[in-house]
Amino acid sequence: MRRLFGAIAVLLFGVVLSGVATGYVERIAPSELARRYLAEVPLDLGAANVVTGILITYRGFDTLGEVAVLFMVAATVGLLLGAETRGTSVASRPEPRPPSELVSNGAEIVLPVIFLFGVYVIANGHLSAGGGFQGGAVVASAVGLMVLARPSIGLDHGFLSVAESLAGVLYVTVGILGLVLAGGFLDSRFLPHGALGAFVSAGAIPLISALLGIKVGAELSVIIDRFRS
Amino acid sequence: MGLPISHVLLVTGLLLMLIGLWGVFAHRNILRIIIGFSIFNTGIHIVMVATGYVTDGTAPIIDRALPVGEAVRRAVDPIPAALVVTAIVIGFSVTAVMLAYAVRLHQARKTLSIDAFTESKW
């Protein structure tokens, strides 16, 4: 009976969504706002990657809010999962199964490459596909693999929270510098443009990207570690 | 030429949304319901990216293949891509909170079946 109602609901959604699919026409040209972004991000901000320019400068305040959401989730997960670890004693748990040889050996080879790739993605966010969020997620995935390969390893929560708070404070400080020296909060144009496509270019965007990467990587690592206990 | 690529993407995203919705409705295990939500989420992201495609467009990244002057004519819409980055992070956050609640619920009742939690059912 319940499944019947579920099937009917999915079917009705399917009717609505099929209307979307049949009515869709591929666009010939980007919208007015998109054309403006495409023209202004390379010239005005000096960033080769238009998406990063939008995310970090034009929608920088939104990105700050997003980082705040991540922080709140890390706190919530800590609140939900942290309370029980005090209740149940560690000794009563069964001995954790050691990771398989494939995981532990694979991690030894792949881990440094993943960390390096994460840093590369963060540092090249203004030049090619990538940025602080993406690179931070790559770094956190490496932390997840590390935790799987060595279950006994303990992440230093103190260090992670200090790194994360410091990155957050510096991020807001850079935003205020933009307010004082350039056009507004989180305006990246208070540092020189540099040549379009050079590694050191695009004003403060690489700096903000690196801070975001540190913050996101640390926050996601804390969330992963919370689920381990 | 056949189907335009963005249409294929759009239909794939919509189908994923329906599959995720079915997963949420049909399953009684909380973990499976969470997986259903995640698939639904991914479907929405694919739909959003598909709507940003412009015919014969390329990635909105300026390099040798896409000089500054041509970006306005040849690049896809960058706004859905920027919005989807935000949406992915929020989706991750929601999934993390759901999983944390699932862990707590399992501690309370030693089961993950949604039928065991009837307090707020009318």
Image (spheres, grey):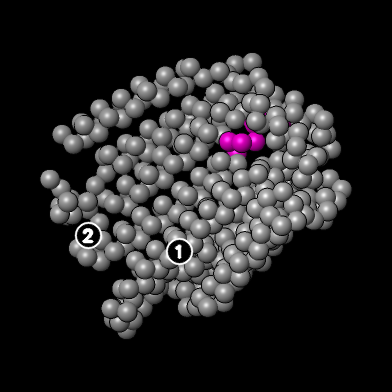
Residue B78 falls inside the magenta stretch: yes
Residue A67 falls inside the magenta stretch: no
Instruction: Specify whether residue A211 is in view.
Output: no
B110 vs B81: above or below: below
Q: Residue furthest front?
A: A180
Looking at the rendering, in which quadrant would you find the C terminus of chain A?
bottom left
Instruction: Specify whether residue B86 is in view.
Output: yes
Picture coordinates of residue A145 (x, y %)? 54, 64
Residue for badge 1: A74
A71 vs A202: above or below: below
Q: CA distance from mark 1 to mark 2?
A: 25 Å
Q: Secondary structure at mark 2?
A: loop
Q: Residues within 10 Å of mark 1 (few under 14, many from 20)?
A: many
Q: Residue furthest left?
A: B122
Residue at x-position 32% and y-position 79%: A86
Q: In the depicted view, which residue is nearer to us: A185 or A2? A: A185
Residue at x-position 32% and y-position 73%: A83
Picture coordinates of residue B31 (x, y %)? 32, 52
Residue for badge 2: B111
